[in-house]
């Protein structure tokens, strides 16, 4: 019951599609820790950028009113978030729901949303990672619940999900009672993931932590000042409890979610016949989601970069090979060119 295959997601998506969202006046209030609308009030938001300029960069074209503009990937702008009274968002929190709206056209593999990390870890290093994070990667998003030492334990990454719309609501729900985390894109839940016994919000953040949005303290040669987010962010909300699927829908609806993603872009929403709620029968071979999903190193000093570089390198290599072939051709005047 803890893990479901993609079919479940499809079923759930269809279920969600079938729901007629009724307009709600306000977002769920029970357990609401903070709400950032980026309209007229920036309480609890400390914007920073690489030049040390703390001026907020608000964009008019937000999901609701204005949004915060994280800029392009290299802009190195980010937010530090606290409660209105300046205390930490995760203070005393065991279960949580963290949600935001994103409009991100960047092609980066390291666009950070939420990044909550213990202050004892100034720089993350693979495979010793300690943070709760949401990472956008080229039109997809993944959630992480890392407290790793020497190995990246299984079951600590939430499903990598596609963001099908221009604006997408990303919601990360962690239920401490079941130690299960679920990532939603808009109102569609991904595969719930049960975390290892040895970790909790408290064990990860150690009660002394920082919450960034749009910045992570991963560093490498390509990112000497850390990794950053990009695009527009709006309507960040944090709850000190796990919202139910219905409440996530209510939250989305209250924030203006009214329509379904473009079907041509949605990942697999064509199984329109599936009955809505039989998650049980669609049980998954549970296991290997973690290996099969996002090449584990989404960010690690090595992995993600390596992955990204690999792509570029692949292209570069091809060009390089072509160049070599051309050179050979020039030298030998033969038609090896066809080889590539
Ligand atoms: Ca707004």
Image (cartoon, rainbow, N blue to C red):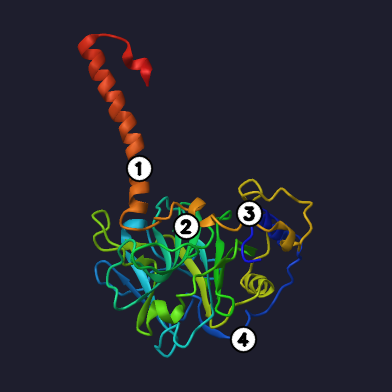
Question: Quick one: label 3 or label 1, which is nearer the N terminus?
Answer: 3
Question: Quick one: label 1 or label 4, which is nearer the N terminus?
Answer: 4
Residue 159 screen position, x and y as percent: 54, 59
| Disc 3: which residue | 6
| Disc 1: which residue | 310
Q: Distance between the residues labelled 2 and 4?
A: 30 Å
Q: Residue at the spot x=54%, y=83% of the render? A: 240
Task: Determine whether the beta carbon of the residue marked 1 sits less than 8 angstroms from the nearest atom of ligand 1.
Answer: no
SS under mark 1: helix
Q: Distance between the residues labelled 1 and 4?
A: 46 Å
| Disc 2: which residue | 104
Q: Are marks 3 and 1 in contact (CB under 8 Å)?
A: no
Q: Nearer the viewer, mark 2 or mark 4?
A: 4
Q: Distance between the residues labelled 2 and 3?
A: 24 Å
How packed mark 4 is, by other alpha carbons closer than 10 Å (few <14, some 14-19, many 20 or more), is few
Q: Nearer the viewer, mark 2 or mark 3?
A: 3
Q: Which of marks 3 and 4 is in front?
A: 3
Q: In which quarter of the image is the N terminus?
A: bottom right
């Amino acid at each position: 019951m803890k893990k479901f295959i993609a079919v479940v997601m499809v079923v759930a998506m269809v279920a969600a599609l079938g729901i007629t969202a009724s307009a709600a006046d306000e977002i769920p209030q029970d357990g609401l820790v903070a709400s950032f609308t980026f309209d007229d009030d920036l309480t609890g938001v400390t914007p920073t950028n690489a030049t040390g300029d703390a001026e907020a960069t608000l964009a008019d074209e937000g999901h609701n009113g204005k949004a915060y503009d994280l800029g392009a990937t290299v802009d190195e702008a980010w937010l530090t978030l606290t409660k209105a009274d300046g205390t930490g968002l995760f203070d005393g929190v065991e279960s949580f729901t963290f949600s935001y709206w994103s409009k991100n056209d960047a092609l980066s593999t390291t666009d950070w949303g939420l990044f909550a990390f213990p202050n004892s870890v100034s720089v993350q290093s693979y495979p010793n990672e300690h943070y709760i994070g949401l990472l956008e990667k080229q039109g997809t998003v993944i959630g992480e619940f890392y407290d790793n030492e020497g190995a990246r334990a299984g079951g600590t990454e939430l499903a990598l999900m596609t963001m099908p719309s221009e604006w997408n609501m990303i919601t990360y729900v962690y239920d401490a009672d079941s130690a299960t985390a679920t990532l939603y894109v808009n109102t569609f839940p991904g595969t719930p993931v049960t975390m290892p016994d040895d970790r909790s919000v408290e064990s990860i953040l150690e009660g002394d932590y920082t919450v960034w949005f749009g910045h992570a303290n991963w560093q490498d040669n390509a990112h000497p000042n850390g990794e950053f987010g990009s695009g527009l962010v709006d309507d960040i909300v944090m709850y000190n409890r796990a919202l139910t699927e219905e409440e996530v829908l209510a939250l989305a609806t209250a924030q203006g979610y009214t329509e379904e993603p473009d079907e041509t872009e949605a990942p697999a929403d064509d199984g329109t016949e599936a009955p809505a709620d039989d998650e049980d029968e669609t049980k998954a071979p549970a296991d290997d989601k973690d290996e099969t999903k996002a090449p584990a190193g989404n960010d690690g000093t090595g992995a993600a970069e390596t992955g990204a570089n690999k792509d570029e390198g692949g292209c570069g290599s091809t060009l390089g090979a072509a160049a070599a072939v051309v050179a050979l051709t020039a030298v030998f005047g033969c038609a090896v060119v066809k080889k590539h």
